[in-house]
C-alpha cells in the first residue's frame, strides 16, 4: 500500500495561516491558499474536509498549548495550599505578567488567529470560552480563601467572570493591535498598576 504523501502539509498550513491572518476566516479563499502553497484544491480536500477543518489544523498546536498550561496551573488543588501560597496565587507582579505575555507571544500567530480571525469557525467564541475556563480555575482559589476566613469580601462567580473578562481583554488587545514585544513589555507593567487582586479580593499578602 502506498504511503500517504505528507510533504505538502506544511506548505498548506503555512499558506492557510497567512491567508487567515490577512483576511480572517470568513473572507479567506481556499483558492488563494492552494495557489500560494502550489497545490491543487483536490490535494487540500484530501487532507481537510473544508475551511473550518483547515483553520482548526492551523491553530491546533496553540490550542493544545493553552489547554496544557491551564491544566498545569490548575493541577494543585486550592485545599492543598498553605494560607500564604493561596493568597500568593493572586500576586500578579511584573515578572508573572511578563511570563504570561512571553508564553502567548511565543505562540503569536496562533493566538492572534483565535482572537481576531476565528469568526465563523469552531473557535468563534474563543475569547469568552478562555475567560470561562480561567474563571472555573480561579474561583475555586477564591472560595478556599473565603472558607478559611482569609477574606470576607463576597464576590459571585458571575462577578469573577466579569473581572477576569476585563483582565484578559487587556491581555488580548496588544495582540489584536499588533504591539511589538517592546510595547508589550511596557503594557505589562501598566497592567500590574491597573489590576490589584489583593485589594479587589479583600486580603493582604501574608
Image (cartoon, helix red, strand yellow):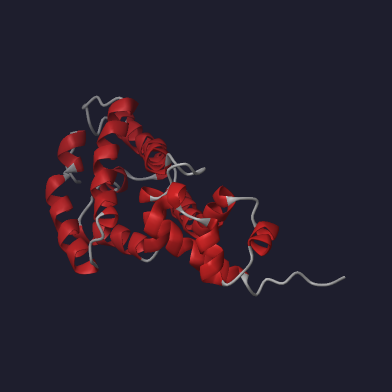
Residue 45 occupies which quadrant of the picture?
bottom right
Answer whether residue 66 is visible to the viewer in this image: yes
Q: Residue at x 45, y 50 (%)?
A: 25
**In which quadrant will I find the N terminus?**
bottom right
The answer to which of 194 and 49 lies nearer the viewer is 49
**Residue occupying image coordinates x 19% and y 57%:** 188
Q: Is residue 107 above or below residue 88?
A: below
Farthest residue in the right direction? Answer: 1
Q: Is residue 53 above or below residue 141?
A: below
Give coordinates of residue 166: x percent, y percent. 24, 39
Q: Residue at x 29, y 45 (%)?
A: 168
Residue 111 shows in the view: no
Work out whether residue 15 or residue 184 is closer to the camera in this orientation and state it: 15
Locate residue 14, reporting x and y percent. 50, 68
The answer to whether 199 appears left or right of 163 in the picture is left
The location of residue 136, given as percent across then percent down, is 41, 36
In the rendered image, the vertical position of residue 7 relative to residue 170, given as above or below: below
Residue drawn at x 17%, y 57% as measured from the top left: 187
Say which of 203 and 131 sits in front: 131
Q: Is residue 86 left or right of residue 42?
A: left
Amino acid at each position: 500500500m502506498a504511503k500517504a504523501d505528507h510533504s505538502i502539509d506544511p506548505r498548506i498550513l503555512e499558506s492557510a495561516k497567512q491567508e487567515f491572518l490577512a483576511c480572517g476566516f470568513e473572507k479567506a479563499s481556499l483558492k488563494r491558499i492552494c495557489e500560494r502553497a502550489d497545490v491543487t484544491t483536490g490535494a487540500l480536500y484530501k487532507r481537510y474536509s473544508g475551511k473550518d477543518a483547515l483553520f482548526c489544523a492551523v491553530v491546533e498546536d496553540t490550542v493544545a498549548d493553552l489547554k496544557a498550561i491551564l491544566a498545569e496551573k490548575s493541577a494543585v488543588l486550592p485545599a492543598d495550599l498553605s494560607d500564604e501560597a493561596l493568597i500568593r496565587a493572586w500576586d500578579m507582579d511584573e515578572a508573572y505578567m511578563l511570563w504570561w505575555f512571553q508564553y502567548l507571544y511565543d505562540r503569536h500567530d496562533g493566538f492572534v488567529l483565535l482572537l481576531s480571525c476565528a469568526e465563523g469557525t469552531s473557535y468563534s467564541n474563543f475569547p469568552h470560552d478562555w475567560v470561562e475556563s480561567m474563571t472555573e480555575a480561579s474561583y475555586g482559589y477564591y472560595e478556599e480563601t473565603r472558607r478559611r476566613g482569609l477574606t470576607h469580601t463576597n464576590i459571585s462567580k458571575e462577578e469573577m467572570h466579569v473581572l477576569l473578562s476585563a483582565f484578559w481583554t487587556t491581555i488580548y488587545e496588544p495582540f489584536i493591535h499588533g504591539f511589538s514585544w517592546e510595547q508589550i513589555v511596557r503594557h505589562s507593567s501598566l497592567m500590574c498598576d491597573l489590576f490589584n487582586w489583593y485589594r479587589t479580593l479583600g486580603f493582604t499578602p501574608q
